[in-house]
Amino acid sequence: MLRFDPTGWGKTFQEEKNNLQYYLKNFKIAINHYGATAYKNGRSNRNVDILVTVESLADLTAVVVRLQSKGYKLINYEDGHDCSTLVVPKKVLGYGVTIKVMVYASEIFNKYNAFITLLKEHEHLVRQYNEFRDELTRKCGSDWKSYRELKIDYINLLLEEHFKFE
């Protein structure tokens, strides 16, 4: 895991955001930095996570095809579902880093945006989430599907708990 570097991660995100805006200029999209490189004291597993939100599921497939034509490799896609993941390798801060672009239909974005906002505002939640991710990595190993499902369950629980008491 790599420590948070606001200059390097932020610069990498901005460069990739500029690329994505150019590649996807014909689509109505939002591009956000999320994941461990987006908030203070996050620990990255060498991924700079970028969330591209499209207006509808219909646009999702077209965006995926467009990004593939620009060299992004599709690693996860399920037709008719709300998310696809594409990656492109880069060199950042002297490390081999993967730019991970997750393309979501807009309905999903609000949940992830709320989660990142919580992490940015509550440092104790960052520590708790880092510990959870460490344990999850040990538990799931290379089983990406289980890792993702358990992480989504954790995020949903955290959001429910936080907003229940406000």
Image (cartoon, rainbow, N blue to C red):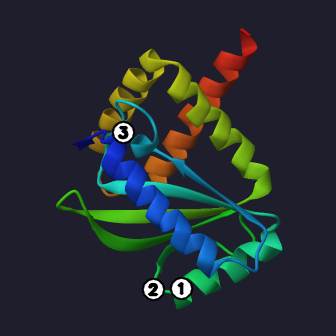
For marks 3 and 2, the one nearer the N-term is 2
Q: Is residue 54 above or below residue 70?
A: above
Q: Amino acid at mark 1?
A: Gln
Evaluate whether residue 144 shows in this view: no
Rendered residue at 36%/50% (across/down): 9
Q: Residues within 10 Å of mark 1 (few under 14, many from 20)?
A: some
Residue 84 drawn at (x, y percent) = 60, 68
Quadrant of the rendered structure where residue 157 is? top right
**Cβ–Cβ under 8 Å for marks 3 and 2:** no
Is residue 65 rendered to the left or right of residue 76?
right
Rendered residue at 75%/80% (across/down): 26
For marks 3 and 1, the one nearer the N-term is 1
**Cβ–Cβ under 8 Å for marks 3 and 1:** no
Q: Which corner quadrant holds the N terminus? A: top left
Which of the labelled discs sits on residue 71, or is there none? 2
As drawn, which residue projects farthest toward the bottom? 69
Label 2 secondary element:
loop
Q: Residues within 10 Å of mark 2 (few under 14, many from 20)?
A: few
**Cβ–Cβ under 8 Å for marks 2 and 1:** yes
Residue under pointer 3: 136
Q: Which corner quadrant holds the C terminus? A: top right
Which of the labelled discs sits on residue 68, or is there none? 1
- Cα separation, mark 3 vs mark 1, equals 30 Å
Label 3 secondary element:
helix
Q: Amino acid at mark 2?
A: Gly
Label 1 secondary element:
helix
Rendered residue at 17%/61% (across/down): 94
Q: Amino acid at mark 3?
A: Leu
Which of pointers 3 and 2 indicates the residue nearer the eye?
A: 2
